[in-house]
Amino acid sequence: MALPQTYGTDHVYGLLDTTQDYITIQSDGIDDSCGVDVKVLDSTGRVCTVRKDDLHNALTYMGILKPGGTKPKAGFTVTFDSVSYIIDTVTNAGENTGFRKFTVKATKYQQIT
Amino acid sequence: MPTPLAIRSIAEQSVLARFAQFAADLPGVQLHAGQTDEVRSVPIIIFHAESARPAADLGGYPLGNFELTFKIYVYSSADDSTLAEHRQRVEAVQAIMQDLPGLKAAWTQGQLYHGWFSSDEEGVADRRWGNLISYTLFSVYPTAS
């Protein structure tokens, strides 16, 4: 009887975008949600119709700050993985035993390109 | 009879293939994959995938995804080489391994997801300079086609 062959299943590894010139990105994440989320209940209180619309993509990424580059500011836009987001918050945090960490939270709204 | 794959052999042969592309930059240096009981001469660089573990993120279903501890041994004779010459070989090893896209392209079976430098230890014994350079590699077997 022949030995079974060994195969693998490949997966996606790592970060979506590492091209920001002002940080070395350590983590990223995108949460999708709907700004319009309406439920209609029937006479017994059970959900019988749902309307979900107005997609929001909430982006968070964190990196270690570099000396150069132009840091983004809240209220401005940032392009991440070829998508333009509007920046909600920027956090620039440091400690006396480590690198400075720079976190950006931004949102892509469905109707805003 | 099909030949089952071994992730540690794939890793060693892949790194060896990458270093073979730089043989001209390592004149007179033997490149050797894996452990052997044969008599070796120095200078030599030995590629050894010391251990392989299932990729922890995949839990109980690793599906042929591995995290490897990969060690590169660089030995030079203290009679034939100066410490500076030995360290040049060590730096060459680090430079070649730092070019991750090049290493990924040289991967012989499956794919290399990522890899990074873990440590570099230096010592001298029996008139030999020796460095042990460790890397962490993430790799997967080839998919069934």
Image (tube, coloured by chain):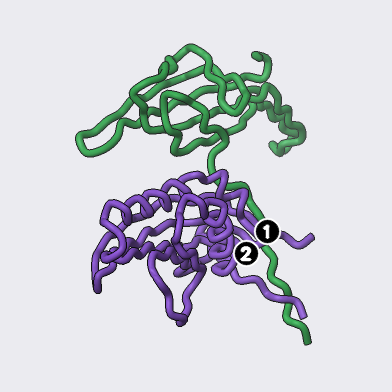
Work out which quarter of the rendered image holds the N terminus of chain B and state it. bottom right
Instruction: Identify the disc placed on residue B114.
Output: none
Whether residue A21 is visible to the viewer of this picture, yes or no, is yes
Q: Which chain is green?
A: A
Q: Amino acid at mark 1?
A: Thr
Where residue B117 appears, as percent x and y from the top left, is: 40, 51
- Residue B17 falls left or right of residue B88: right
* Closer-to-camera residue (A57/B9): B9
Residue A75, percent across and down?
47, 12
The chain drawn in purple is: B
Dot 2: chain letter? B
- In the image, taking residue B107 as reference, residue B75 lies left or right, namely left
Residue at image coords 55%, 57%: B20
- Residue under label 1: A9
Residue B64 badge: 2
Q: Is residue B58 visible?
A: no
Relative to A84, A91 lies left or right = left
